[in-house]
Amino acid sequence: MLGSNSPRTLAAMDNLNAQVDIDAAALFGWDDTALHGELLSNHGSKLNRRVGTVQGISNIEVAQNSARLYATWIEHQFKATKMRALVGLYDLNSEFYATDASGMLIHPSFGIGIDFSQSGRNGPSIFPNLGLGVRIRQPIGQGGYVQAAVLDGTPGGPEQPGTNVD
């Protein structure tokens, strides 16, 4: 508890994200192909650690301050089957286990569940540590689809926080 003579410190954090999407047909002549690139910068005073809660109070705080290459991939659609294949640094939480609440609220309670968040040695391929992955999506019926992904099991290895690929 802070008393009247206790020093006060500023709690701050940032989340800067720059994205670019490129139509590879227009740029390189690669039909039905898209390129996506992101840069991500996160810094802060580690409020979650200072508060000492199990779950934290902010879902955008990172353990290691860094600027990094983030979700960066190439996706191709195969004309005959309409199947789409994506390869690159992939955020599992962008298409799997994404909820309406997690898109609007930053408290960890509304993000990915503990069943996924505690998987692997460094968690799954989600913010802020992404791993290499492959995702396929096959349309079925009117507006439906089936998709699957295979991802790096230790994104941003525990011995190298702040990196994407070991």
Image: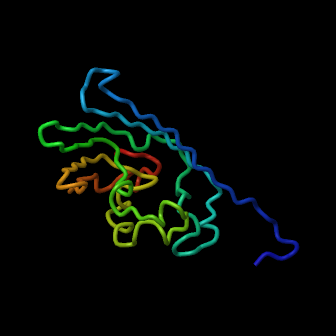
Q: Residue at x 79, y 75 (%)?
A: 2
The quarter in which the N terminus is drawn is bottom right
**How many labels were placed on the picture?**
0
Q: Looking at the picture, does residue 47 appear above or below residue 29? A: below
Q: Residue furthest left?
A: 80
Task: Tell me where residue 102 appears, x and y as whole percent.
Answer: 47, 64
For residue 11, which quarter of the picture?
Answer: bottom right
The quarter in which the C terminus is drawn is top left
Q: Residue at x 53, y 56 (%)?
A: 62
Q: Residue at x 12, y 38 (%)?
A: 80
Task: Tell me where residue 17 appears, x and y as whole percent.
Answer: 53, 43
Q: Residue at x 38, y 50 (%)?
A: 130
| Left or right of 132 in this view: 53 | right
Model colouring? rainbow
| Left or right of 38 in this view: 119 | left
Q: Residue furthest bottom?
A: 1
Q: Residue furthest front?
A: 142
Task: Tell me where residue 88 appears, x and y as whole percent.
Answer: 31, 41
For residue 81, which quarter of the picture?
Answer: top left
Q: Nearer the viewer, residue 68 or 102?
A: 102
Q: Looking at the picture, does residue 18 appear above or below residue 115? A: above
Q: Nearer the viewer, residue 119 or 99?
A: 99
| Left or right of 89 in this view: 66 | right
